[in-house]
Image (cartoon, rainbow, N blue to C red):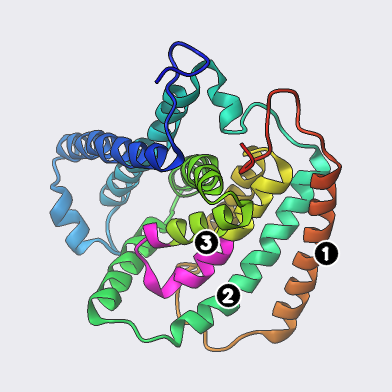
Amino acid sequence: MLGNHKEAYNFSPIGSLLLLALLMMLCSGIGSALGWLTARSYGLEIGAVIDTFSDQSPLEERNLLRWINFFSQLFTFTVPAVLLARMLEGQKWLSSLQLHRASRRAIYAAAGLYIFGIFILSQAAFWFNQQLPLPSWADQMEGTALRLTQGLLVMESPAEFLLTLLVVAVLPALGEELVFRGVVQQQLAKAARSPAWGIWLSAAIFSAFHLQFAGFLPRLLLGAGLGYLFLWSRSLWVPIAAHFLINGMQIAGQYIQKNALAEAAVDEVNWPATTLAGLLVAGLSYYLYGQYRKQEPTAGAQPPGHN
């Protein structure tokens, strides 16, 4: 059924999500093909590199994995989200994703502190997650993910640092926010008729999509924090910036200090830091919610989850 624009189509929220899943599968195939071609240009086999990849792997293999991740991120997340928005909204696709406007600098500053507080709280959630037993297959997946991440975080030059920042911080911040907040959260909020349900359900999907079950709870918390930033700011650029801040901070810290920042065991909860982080998040939530309540949606636009 045609929408307001002749090039836009009208789908139900669930139909939109199913179409997104289809586009993600199709486009990820293109990304995989480009990764395979890149490996061939290096004279390497992807499977053999992944099987032995670690923090001891040579520069050529590290960069190959980075380019494979580049194509995977671009075609699994960014491209499908933009294609879907174009199909559903036509020329209004930017506003449908809440990309048509930025927020005030004070909102970005508050969002940065807010997501940093959420990140500290997520360390306590990670400790709790570690207390839950995992099946052997999940433990094996965790070990593989940790090994690959530690290899990708080996950066011996500024060029490696910049490429890693692009692949591990910039593209995930853009693509994952387009999919999980720009599309999934808004569509689930419509289906459930509740912004809160949209935030928490999309956060759960966001966390599960990473297939790292020892980190499910902290990613759930981070995803929910990003979801509330999207709701309160009415701009997808705010959670994109916050997502980039968290990832970029870890990449920069790894490059400067040369310490492994990949997920590892958390022996105990730092309760003073957790308490302060909780107070910081509570205070900033009050401020950001107050700013949200003061805003009036621009003509023809609706707050995320209220469409």
Q: Is residue 300 above or below residue 206?
A: above
Farthest residue to the top: give it.
Answer: 6
- Residue drawn 25% across the image and 61% down it: 53
Residue at the spot of label 1: 283
Of 168 and 97, the residue lying toward us: 97
* Residue 177 locus on image (x, y percent): 52, 44
Distance, label 3 to label 1, CA atoms, is 30 Å
Are the residues at dot 1 and dot 2 in contact (C-beta closer than 8 Å)?
Answer: no
Q: Secondary structure at mark 2?
A: helix
Tell which circle, 2 or 3, labels the residue nearer the N-terminal end: 2
Q: Is the Cβ of the residue at disc 3 closer than 8 Å to that at disc 1?
A: no
The amino acid pointed to by label 3 is Gln
In the image, is 82 to the left or to the right of 107? left
Give the left or right position of residue 160, taking residue 39 as reference.
Answer: right
Residue 140 lies in quadrant: bottom left
Q: Is residue 256 visible?
A: no
Quarter of the image where one finds residue 148? bottom left
Mark 3 closeness class: few <14, some 14–19, many ≥20 residues within 10 Å? some
Magenta stretch, residue numbers:
208-222
> Which residue is label 3 attached to?
254
Q: Amino acid at mark 2?
A: Gln
Q: Please tell me how crowded label 2 is: few (under 14), some (14-19), or many (20+) other residues with Cα within 10 Å.
A: many
Whether residue 212 appears in magenta in the rendering, the answer is yes
Q: Does residue 191 belong to the magenta stretch? A: no
Residue at position x 75%, y 36% in the image: 103
Majority SS type along the magenta span: helix
Are there few (<14), some (14-19), or many (20+) residues within 10 Å of tag 1? some
Q: Which residue is mark 2?
A: 123
Quadrant for the N terminus, please.
Answer: top left
Considering the numbered disc 3 on the image, is that residue within a helix, a strand or a loop?
helix
- The residues bearing labels 1 and 2 have C-alpha atoms spaced at a distance of 20 Å
